Amino acid sequence: MTISRSRTLPTLVLTLLGLGAATVAQAETRVPGTKVFYSYQKDPMNDANLSIVFIDELNDTGSNTYLSMKCAAGQGWLFGIATKHALLPTTPIESRDELDKQIDDLYAVSYRVGTSQAATVGDIDSAWLNRKLRPESLLFYDMNANNAIAQGLMDGKKVVIRIQPRRDGAVVKQQLDYTFQPQGFAQAFAAVKYCK
């Protein structure tokens, strides 16, 4: 079944990675009976894989909270999370770099794959689309975390993401836990040609 939903993370990740604007509200294919969607996309100029996989959160009914995995043009993949909560201030900021330096002070993001011990995402950054902050989204620039999450999902293990405020300046004051089930991820990853 093919459906069309408006998600902003695919385009913003492309913008962040400098991969061009090859995707704009692309149709997504749902893996039947799961909360996993994917969109296979290739750059029209160099055939680089720009696909994306989405996993809606276990308890989310409106695709407001989801984990995304964006293929990085043959350079692996990048995970990000979008939530129904604003995580970052929407007040004017001095610069994107300044905000990204503050994020690690505002929040600790950790993940747990299956029954393994929880680990911390070492580098989280803000997400932007058309030079506008997406305050509900965070990107994981930690390749160890990205690889562990992908491998766990491929192995059929659930992934739990925890966003924990570290200080008073955090917009969200309580801990947020999100669970993502693996069913359908392996099929979606294969459909996007394993980001190669």
Image (cartoon, rainbow, N blue to C red):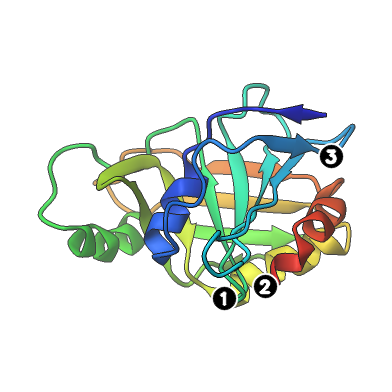
Up-down relation of residue 106 to residue 84 (above or below): below
What distance separates the C-alpha of mark 1 from that of mark 2? 6 Å
Where 143 falls versus 107 (above or below)? below
Residue beneath disc 2? 147
For this view, does 188 lie left or right of residue 97? right
In the rendered structure, the answer to whether residue 148 lies left or right of residue 18 reads right
Crowding near the residue tagged with mark 3, few <14, some 14–19, many ≥20 C-alpha atoms within 10 Å: some
Q: Which mark is residue 31?
A: 3
Q: Is residue 116 visible?
A: no
Mark 3 or mark 1: whose residue is earlier in sequence: 3
Do labels 1 and 2 touch, CB within 8 Å?
A: yes
Q: Secondary structure at mark 2?
A: helix
- Name the secondary structure under disc 1: helix
Amino acid residing under circle 2: Asn
Of mark 2 and mark 3, the one earlier in the sequence is 3
User: Dot 1 corresponds to which residue?
Assistant: 143
Tell me the amino acid under the disc marked 1. Answer: Met
Q: Is residue 46 visible?
A: yes
In terms of secondary structure, where does tag 3 sit?
loop
Which residue: 55% across, 59% down?
44
Quadrant of res 177: top right
Q: Residue at x 55, y 60 (%)?
A: 43
